[in-house]
Amino acid sequence: MAYELTDSQVILSIPAGADLSAKQYHFVKISGTGVISVAAATDAPIGVLVNDPASGETAAVAISGVVKVEASAAIPAGAAVGTTSTGTAVGLVTGTDTTKWLVGRAITAAGSAGDIITVAVDAASAGRAA
């Protein structure tokens, strides 16, 4: 495992514990085999996958910084962001979504599901949206 500091991201390089070739720009979590897709909206993401590795290949995970993320639905700019059970970004309401992890803030807005938005992510310091 290694990390790299770019101009706008801290990237963790870690083996993919599953085929993540279709999960670029999705939230991922740590498992005993490396990084895998989040499986529940209440999972604690380690960051956003910025490449598309097959199982066993090196996954590049942005754990903090300005990152592209796929949206699950419309998300306004400035909204608190967490993850869905499929790893896409979702807007959170602080004080309401208390079982979910707040991992960033939307910089750009999403008009609908599938839009790629820009999010300021800080998964290493994530907390519940209490």
Image (cartoon, rainbow, N blue to C red):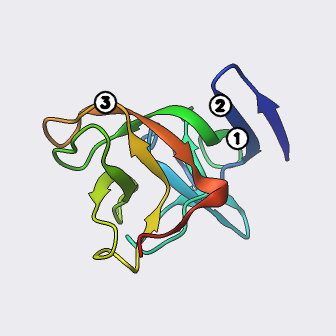
**Is residue 9 rendered to the left or right of residue 114?**
right
Instruction: Identify which residue is drawn at 71% across, 36% down.
Output: 11
**Is residue 75 rendered to the left or right of residue 25?**
left
SS for callout 3: loop
The location of residue 79, given as percent across then percent down, is: 30, 48
Q: Residues within 10 Å of mark 1 (few under 14, many from 20)?
A: some
Q: Earlier in the sequence, mark 1 or mark 2?
A: 2
Label ID, residue 9: 2
Q: Earlier in the sequence, mark 1 or mark 3?
A: 1
The kind of residue tagged 2 is: Gln
Instruction: Identify which residue is drawn at 77% across, 28% down.
Output: 5
Most foreground residue, 24 or 64: 64
**Is residue 40 rendered to the left or right of residue 127?**
left
Most foreground residue, 58 or 123: 123
Q: Residues within 10 Å of mark 2 (few under 14, many from 20)?
A: some
The kind of residue tagged 3 is: Thr
Label ID, residue 108: 3
Q: Which residue is mark 1?
A: 57
The kind of residue tagged 1 is: Glu
Question: On the rendered image, what quadrant is the C terminus found in?
Answer: bottom left
Instruction: Identify which residue is drawn at 42% across, 41% down.
Output: 22
SS for callout 1: loop
Label ID, residue 111: none
Q: CA distance from mark 1 to mark 3?
A: 31 Å
SS for callout 2: strand
